[in-house]
Image (cartoon, grey):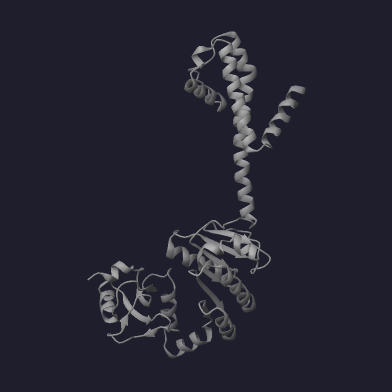
Amino acid sequence: MKLALIFDRAFHAMADMHWRMLAGLILFHALSSWLLLAMAGESALQPPAVFFYWYATTAYTVGYGDLSPQGVAGRLITAVWIFPGAIAAFTTVVAKVLAGIGDIWRVRRSGKGDYSKMTDTILLVGYHPARTPKMVDELCAEFRGGQTLVLLTRQSATELDSRIRYVQSESLTSTAALARAGVANASRVLVYASSDADTLAATLAVAAAAPETAHIVCFFEDADNARLLAQHCPKVEAILSSGPEMLARAARDPGASQVITALTSHLDEGATLFSLTWQGAARPIGDLAQRLWGLRATLLAHQPTGAASPRFNPPRETGVEAGDRIFYVAAERLDQFGLEGS
């Protein structure tokens, strides 16, 4: 009974050790085992590679039986010293690894994970139970797992989406929470809070912490909030609710709402609206429109660098300069090289 108590206390003491201390004890036990077997005259187990193989199979409890001590002294040393120590070391390492994995899982599930080291992420700020999952579906369909999605929200998640990383904070403007969510390295940030006031505050916080190259998009119900944001963060793209306008358009032009919805969704089959920032040499937009037509795509609009809004149906002779953005409708996203082809 006392022996079992001693082993139990020893096991828990090893489990609470740091990795360096545990590695030192394992090394000490292996070296002392090798020396004891040498003193016992077990010459077959003395070569370092042979001893390592035998010691590892002993610790892993595999026990192939191809190597074993031959003398009485060597067998006693193995039974009393090597077996308990090697097996205890192996089980302790396994226990610590599993405990570490469990701690990481619990931290991430509670929203306390740290994703500040990740790069080129897509950060979603705020959560709407019906609309946020749809945004996740759209982003995953577009990027197909190529970028990591991180969600910063005030709500405690009960059912986590395996496609996103989760950060919980009492405030969407918290500098620490935004840092843990990886805002400093994000390539895109989508802000969709429960109210326009929260969206405005969160967007201002994001704009202050995100890199210059990050594309920030936010959603407002009220145009006044969008105008207020534009005064402080002109580079942020604000999306306004188009419910009344969509309703009126559908009444005047039946089917218009279905077309607009299809153009904005990557989940629906058929054409989808895309944009591309032109990086090549200047060329007439008519040439690009013809090239797009050959790729089964349709040019929709052209937005010159610095322009507040895109121009629809521009004249064919309009020049497209480096940095301009073109909008087109296609079944899939096209790249610069495809458009530069003859």
Q: Is residue 20 visible?
A: yes
Q: Residue at x 35, y 70 (%)?
A: 331
Locate residue 213, reporting x and y percent. Answer: 48, 69
Locate residue 124, reporting x and y percent. Answer: 55, 67
Q: Residue at x 59, y 45 (%)?
A: 101
- The answer to whether 314 is drawn above or below residue 117 in the figure is below
Q: Pick whichever, 321 or 5, lies toward us.
A: 321
Q: Residue at x 62, y 36 (%)?
A: 20
Which residue is situated farthest in the bottom direction here?
Answer: 252
Residue 181, picture quadrant: bottom right
Locate residue 78, reporting x and y percent. Answer: 60, 17
Q: Quadrant of the C terminus?
A: bottom left
Residue 14, picture quadrant: top right
Q: Pick whichever, 7 or 247, lies toward us.
A: 7
Residue 261, picture quadrant: bottom left
Locate residue 295, reporting x and y percent. Answer: 27, 71
Q: Residue at x 62, y 13 (%)?
A: 76
Which residue is situated farthest in the top direction here?
Answer: 72
- In the rendered view, does 55 fall on the left or right side of 339? right
- The answer to whether 218 is drawn above or below residue 115 in the figure is below
Which residue is situated farthest in the left direction here?
Answer: 342
- The answer to whether 317 is drawn above or below residue 112 in the figure is below
